[in-house]
Amino acid sequence: MTTVLYTDADIAVAVKPAGLISEDGTPAESFMPLLREALGCADLYPVHRLDKAVGGVMVYAKTKTAAAFLCAEVQRHAVEKTYLAKVHGIPTPPAGQMRDLLYFDARKNKTYVVDRVRGGVKEALLSYETLCAETDAALVRIQLYTGRAHQIRAQFAHRKMPLFGDRRYGARDGEKQIHLFSHKLSFMHPTRREKMTFSALPPFADGAEIELR
């Protein structure tokens, strides 16, 4: 079942399941055909993306004009993206920032933290807040300021805190899904020019006291 959080003539906000690509493709691999069917519309344009392995809140445009506006907002980092993740280990300090230089190796489909600027290296910045912690695991809320490939996964793994289920970045647990979720999305409506915010919770955060605001 496709979860649609909001729709109007310009946009659709929905929860992409993990395991489907966020761009267009066949019904077996892409979320967009499922969303088109749920909305009953043919025109749908992606304006940002989520890794295939990651689920959560996304906004799609229904017109080319709305798509152009939202793409420009994404490019100037005006779309606010907040994630939830369950990580191995406990962040110290419990809240703070992570700033790194990242290099994405397309051949290996993996991002590495590097120590100097060179071709293909980009700066990455996020802030995090520990919401709850167990003996050797924590649920964290993450504000993303740059949208680098595998950014959250690589930055936490570099600090010996791989995400649960993320075997590519060092997790050795038995989880089948990566515990990373696009929890909240805030953006300016393309025609009404008012700020809109939408939230959802992942299964791995069940029972945690998290405000949906």
Image (cartoon, rainbow, N blue to C red):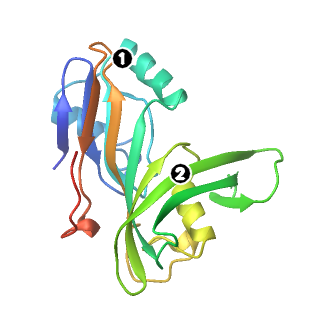
Rendered position, 84 above or below 60: below
The residue at 81%/48% (across/down) is 117
> Element type at marker 1?
helix
Q: Is label 1 or label 2 in front?
A: 2
The residue beneath circle 1 is 66
Rendered position, 30 above or below 153: above
Viewer-closest of 13 and 84: 84
Quick check: can you spot residue 23? no
Viewer-closest of 41 and 166: 166
The residue at 18%/39% (across/down) is 5
Type of amino acid at the residue the image marks with label 2: Leu
Mark number displayed over residue 126: 2
Quarter holding residue 168: bottom right
Residue 71 coordinates in the image, percent (x, y): 47, 24
- Residue that protrudes farthest toward the bottom in the picture: 135
Type of amino acid at the residue the image marks with label 1: Ala
Give neighbour class at mark 2: few <14, some 14-19, many 20+ (Cα, 10 Å).
Answer: some
Residue 129 coordinates in the image, percent (x, y): 41, 61
> Element type at marker 2?
strand
Quarter holding residue 179: bottom left
> Answer yes or no: do the residues labelled 1 and 2 have beta carbons within 8 Å?
no
